[in-house]
Image: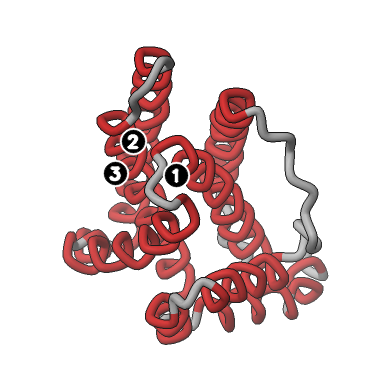
């Protein structure tokens, strides 16, 4: 199994799930702020299209067209969307906020993993950083709309192992055993942990 590919496929599925989720929220918002919320969701889901296309093309370039087959991607997207609905209670704005907060976790984990594995080209480095920056703006807009202050992290956000452990804990506490089992089968916690544990070996080459 190519773990570099697995991490990129998971990130691609996360972006596609976010697009699907924001697009659905675009249709479902209602109330006195309908027009503004409708336009905000339009901005969020449209911002993902080019990111999805660019990442998929990078994956195909490095690993071949088989790496982006639709069925495995759809399965992963479904597993990622389950906790979104669980944590948002079906509310479209809460859903959008949760999605944008979750994407920051995915960006940081993918960036740190590839950097420690010395797989991060200049182009991929710039691409991941620019996505994280763009979605920080999305997150700002959602927090302003929801009047939610920036959350203080209860874990070390610079430690990808802790990020994944926290994600697994949230999923387990939400009763999403099938999701955690799926991530375990694909060795996501082990992949991230191995990269973090071996980070000094990579740094020695610099």
Residue on which disc 3 sits: 20
| Residue nearest the viewer, comparing 20 with 58 | 20
Q: Is residue 127 left or right of residue 89?
A: right
Work out whether mark 1 precedes mark 3 in sequence or the reverse, and give the earlier one: 3
Residue on which disc 1 sits: 95
Residue on which disc 2 sits: 25
* Residue 203 against residue 190 in the figure, above or below: above
Whether residues under marks 1 and 3 lie with C-beta atoms below 8 angstroms apart, the answer is no
Q: Residue at x 43, y 55 (%)?
A: 84
Q: Is residue 39 left or right of residue 197?
A: left
| Residues packed near mark 3 inside 10 Å, few (<14), some (14 to 19) or many (20 plus) | some
Work out whether mark 3 precedes mark 2 in sequence or the reverse, and give the earlier one: 3
Residue at disc 1, secondary structure: helix
x, y percent for residue 62: 36, 58
Whether residues under marks 2 and 1 lie with C-beta atoms below 8 angstroms apart, the answer is yes
Q: CA distance from mark 3 to mark 2?
A: 9 Å
Residue at disc 3, secondary structure: helix
Closer to viewer: mark 1 or mark 3: 1
Residue 120, picture quadrant: bottom right
Q: Which quarter of the figure is the C terminus placed in?
A: bottom right
Q: CA distance from mark 2 to mark 1?
A: 8 Å
Closer to viewer: mark 3 or mark 2: 2
x, y percent for residue 118: 63, 63
Q: Residue at x 61, y 75 (%)?
A: 169
Q: CA distance from mark 1 to mark 3?
A: 11 Å
Q: Is residue 206 visible?
A: no
x, y percent for residue 187: 49, 83
Q: Is residue 4 left or right of residue 178?
A: right
């Amino acid at each position: 199994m190519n773990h570099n590919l697995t991490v990129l496929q998971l990130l691609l599925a996360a972006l596609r799930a976010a697009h699907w989720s924001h697009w659905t929220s675009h249709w479902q918002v209602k109330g006195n702020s309908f027009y503004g919320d409708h336009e905000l969701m339009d901005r969020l889901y449209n911002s993902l299209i080019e990111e999805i296309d660019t990442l998929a093309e990078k994956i195909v370039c490095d690993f071949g067209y088989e790496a982006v087959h639709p069925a495995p991607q759809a399965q992963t997207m479904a597993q990622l969307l389950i906790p979104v609905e669980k944590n948002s209670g079906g509310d479209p704005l809460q859903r959008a906020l949760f999605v944008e907060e979750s994407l920051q976790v995915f960006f940081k984990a993918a960036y740190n993993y590839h950097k420690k594995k010395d797989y991060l080209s200049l182009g991929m480095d710039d691409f991941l950083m620019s996505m994280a920056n763009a979605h920080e703006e999305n997150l700002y807009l959602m927090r302003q709309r929801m009047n939610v202050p920036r959350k203080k992290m209860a874990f070390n956000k610079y430690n990808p192992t802790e990020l994944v452990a926290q994600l697994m804990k949230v999923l387990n506490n939400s009763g999403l055993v099938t999701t955690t089992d799926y991530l375990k089968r694909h060795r996501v916690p082990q992949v991230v942990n191995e990269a973090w544990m071996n980070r000094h070996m990579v740094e020695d080459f610099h």
